[in-house]
Amino acid sequence: MTSARTRARMIDRIKQLGVEDQRVLAVMSNVPRHVFVDEALSHKAYDDTALPIGHGQTISQPYIVARMTELALGAAQHEKVLEIGTGCGYQAAVLSQLFKTVYTIERIGQLSKNARDRLNQLGVRNVRVRHGDGSAGMPDAAPFDVILIAAAAPIVPEDLIEQLRLGGRLIFPVGDEVQELRMIERHEDGVVETRLEKVRFVPLLPGLA
Ligand code: SAH
């Protein structure tokens, strides 16, 4: 169920869908996704689908994690990344192997605690897990090279742009029923927004739980 062959199939699928960055593919073949889902679902851990992680939330589809990670690596530097919506911590674990420090924030206390425990167990030392509402980013830890939002906001989160370094990237889904993945790059003379593909994420919600 969690064999090398099962993992290789997941990587093949991600490649078929167009992710080519070898760094992303290498890291994703190493990070054990089955550790991040309930044992009862571990036989599905390497399928290219989102899976429930409790509290009405999901672990993102592997392809989407790969795609967003590939976009993240296009930032000018790879020192500090902020992830909004830790969930089970899988995306953070992937980012931890490609960025010097990962900050991740989750509004649901139990998910945040579980993610922290799991990352500790795996020996991941460069991820700072915080329980909080990430809607306003993390001003006290800014600026970031990348801000990646793992939940969909109804409108473009423009306030977060000022927490980006020059050459930095904000990667986020936007919309309600129909959502789109977008990227905003911060340059010296302004920002460039790119509209990418249709996606499906859980909503970004205010407050703590
Ligand atoms: N990154 C995860 C996917 C998490 S799903 C992965 O690796 O698979 C999105 C998460 O965002 C959910 O756990 C949800 O609780 C969280 N979330 C939603 N709104 C939030 C907010 N305002 N601040 C922080 N986390 C939020």
Image: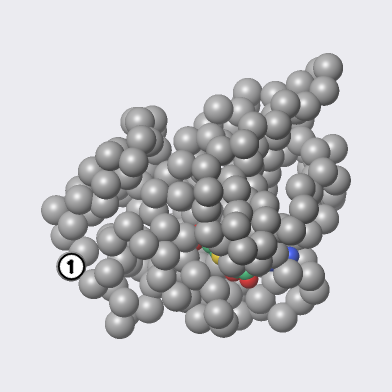
Density class for disc 1 (Cα within 10 Å; few <14, some 14-19, many ≥20) is few
Residue at 72 percent of width and 26 percent of height: 192
Residue lying furthest top:
189
The spot of residue 122 in percent (x, y) is: 41, 61
- Above/below status of 182 relative to 105: above
Residue at 37 percent of width and 36 percent of height: 19
The spot of residue 134 in percent (x, y) is: 75, 60
The spot of residue 3 in percent (x, y) is: 16, 60
Toward which corner of the image does residue 165 lie, by quadrant? Answer: top right
- Above/below status of 27 relative to 90: above
Residue at 47 percent of width and 65 percent of height: 59
The residue tagged with tag 1: helix, strand or loop?
loop
Looking at the picture, the colour scheme in use is one colour
Tally of marks: 1
Residue at 70 percent of width and 31 percent of height: 193
Q: Quadrant of ligand 1?
A: bottom right
- Above/below status of 186 relative to 103: above
Residue lying furthest front:
178
31 to the left or right of 120: left
The spot of residue 133 in percent (x, y) is: 77, 66
Q: Is residue 67 visible?
A: yes
Amino acid type, label 1: Met
Toward which corner of the image does residue 162 lie, by quadrant? Answer: top right
Quadrant where the N terminus sits is bottom left
Q: Nearer the viewer, residue 13 or 92?
A: 13
183 to the left or right of 165: left
Quadrant where the C terminus sits is bottom right
- The residue singled out by tag 1 in the image is 1
